[in-house]
Amino acid sequence: MTDVLQIDDEKRVLKQYYGGVQMDSPNGGFLMVLGIRPGEGGTAVCLLECSVSSLRYRIVIPKATKTERRKVKDVLDAGDDPDCPRHGPGTRLVRAGKNFVCNSCGVAYARA
Ligand SMILES: [Zn+2]
């Protein structure tokens, strides 16, 4: 029951996740976000539950790329509030300790 499964087409789910649209579950129905926790080496792990089967899945949200970091740093250097490079405009990065983090990705994109 508490088994957490890996999703085969993580890329598709991630794309839907970043796009803020409903994530299709491999079992039919859709995937609901249960929570996000920090993963290893700057990644984050998103826990999902299928609305139909109640099976649980996890996807790994990749760490920030160099390009993403640079983009966010440029915005910070300009004195503006950066948005999440993946979630796009409207999803502000928040300061968490020494980092600027997207609450939806769980990923740190810059150092404060
Ligand atoms: Zn994000």
Image: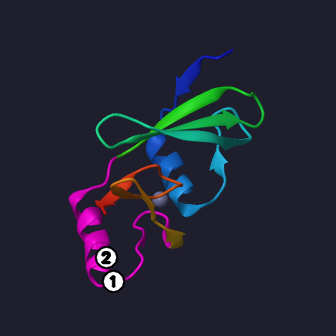
Q: Amino acid at mark 2?
A: Leu
Q: Spatial distance from mark 1 to mark 2, Cα to Cα?
A: 5 Å
Q: Secondary structure at mark 1?
A: loop
Taking the magenta stretch, the answer to whether it contains residue 40 is no
> What mark, if any, has residue 15 been given in the picture?
none
Q: Is residue 33 above or below residue 79?
A: above
Count of numbered marks: 2
Pick the front one: 27 or 79:
79
Q: Is residue 90 above or below residue 49?
A: below
The C terminus sits in image quarter: bottom left
- Residue sitting at x 28%, y 60%: 111
The quadrant where residue 65 appears: bottom left
Q: Is residue 33 above or below residue 108?
A: above
- Residue sitting at x 39%, y 53%: 97
Q: Which residue is mark 1?
A: 79
Q: Which residue is mark 2?
A: 76
The N terminus sits in image quarter: top right
- Residue sitting at x 49%, y 69%: 92
> Percent position (x, y) of residue 41?
28, 38
- Residue sitting at x 31%, y 54%: 64
Q: Is residue 23 left or right of residue 68?
A: right
Q: Is residue 107 left or right of residue 46?
A: left
Crowding near pointer 1: few (<14 within 10 Å), some, many (20+)? few
Q: Secondary structure at mark 2?
A: helix
Residues marked 1 and 2 touching at CB (< 8 Å): yes
The part of the chain drawn in magenta is: 63-89
Q: Is residue 102 left or right of residue 109?
A: right
> Percent position (x, y) of residue 84?
44, 66
Pick the front one: 4 or 27:
4
Pick the front one: 11 or 40:
40
Taking the magenta stretch, the answer to whether it contains residue 72 is yes
Q: Is residue 53 left or right of residue 108?
A: right
